[in-house]
Image (cartoon, helix red, strand yellow):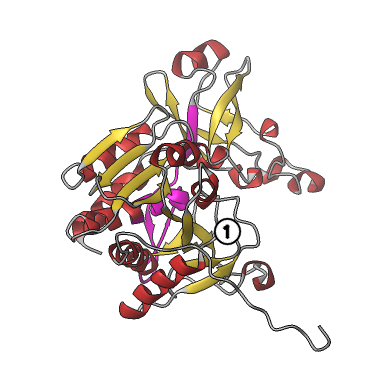
Amino acid sequence: METKSLDFLKRLMALPTPSGWESDGMRLAADYLAPTADRLEFDLHGNLHAVLNPDAATRVMIEGHCDEIGLMVQYVDDDGYLYMTAIGGLTVPLLAGERIVIQGRNGPVYGVFGVRPPHLMKPADREKVAPAELMDIAVDIGAASKKEALKLVDLGNPAVVDAGWRPLAGDRVACRGFDNRIGAFVVIEAFRRLAKVKLQVAVHLVLSVQEELGLVGATTAAYEVKPHVGICVDVGFASDYSGNDKKQVGDVKLGQGPILCFGPTYNFKLQQVLERVATQEKITLQRQVRGRGGNTNAWPMRTVRGGAAVALVSIPLRYMHSAVETLSLGDVQDAIKIVSGGVAALPASPDFAPDPIRFKPSRGG
């Protein structure tokens, strides 16, 4: 990965962007994209729109959501301890002993989810160290009273687990929030590549907000863009670590290429375009099957207004919705090539209407 791109990715990952508070990441992305876009703007909800070749008849929306899971301050007790509520799908037991950073009244406020020492626990207590509910674990910011705490934070202030970029062996990296700033990064880099080629379609990049709260930003953005074609880039479940059941999510490994998702939501002809690009680029695509497609932003592109022909490209990810989400940078680079190559290959008026499928009747049928 080129130095400029990798540096941008690290800067993007360093910024907290919990659902509803994505603007710091969006502003960074807007500055990065500005030299290449024919048009660049934010909508009311905070989605970032960047456009290439805007006058072309066929509109292609490439999308990655920029939000991550997080927390908000819900209650402060008399001793100055904070109690949080979730933004998105938290795995609460993982929080015990973690550090967090809160967007406070005057800047970052640091805290910890404290746990009792094992020396002071009865045997039965040791089985309950990891809390089942957020209300069962307090955040210590060092305040000695409610009054002191409320000088630093207010109810409703957002927070994220304080965990950053950690290089692992080879091209593997662990970081908080790869779900789904890595998808946002892929479409950004694909957009930058597409700015250098002659396009027959209009490209509408959308970095969307609040996916973790119900596909909010992509729904309103798809209504505005009215795409004919949509490519969503998100993360997908890797199954190459202990405890996973491949019968549930398929055989997906880090470093073996991006995932192309198959199922009734996704357009077969558009998938074939992406598969041809993979063949030309000598990229291996992994296949993941989804009987229902309503849990990514491919869904609103597929269903809003008249709908679009959509595809879902996913980055294999270990430990999703934790502070140590882990991926392969090689898979990321290949996903950029797939998305940019697929869009560049589209003719001015692509035909993605389904062809008849003729099943041979069984004997006696």
Q: Nearer the viewer, residue 301 or 9?
A: 301
Q: Residues within 10 Å of mark 1 (few under 14, many from 20)?
A: many
Q: Residue furthest top?
A: 147
Q: Which x, y percent locates residue 180?
A: 45, 50
The stretch drawn in magenta includes residue 165? yes
Residue at 47% in and 35% down: 220
Q: Which x, y percent locates residue 173?
A: 40, 61
Q: Which x, y percent locates residue 321?
A: 55, 50
Camera sees residue 265: yes
Q: Residue furthest bottom?
A: 363
Q: Which residues are magenta?
A: 158-186
120 is higher (above) or lower (below) than 352: above
Which quadrant of the figure has residue 49?
Answer: top left
Camera sees residue 100: no
Which quadrant of the figure has residue 54?
Answer: top left
Q: Which x, y percent locates residue 84?
A: 60, 29
Residue at 49% in and 24% down: 157
171 is higher (above) or lower (below) than 302: below
180 is higher (above) or lower (below) than 254: above
Q: Is residue 52 left or right of residue 139?
A: left
Q: Nearer the viewer, residue 230 or 64?
A: 230
Amino acid type shown at disc 1 = Thr
Q: Is residue 327 left or right of residue 112?
A: left
Q: Quadrant of the N terminus?
A: bottom left
Q: Residue furthest right?
A: 364
Q: Quadrant of the C terminus?
A: bottom right
Residue under numbered circle 1: 265
Q: Circle 1 — which element?
A: loop
The stretch drawn in magenta includes residue 262? no
253 is higher (above) or lower (below) than 50: below
Q: Nearer the viewer, residue 177 or 44?
A: 44
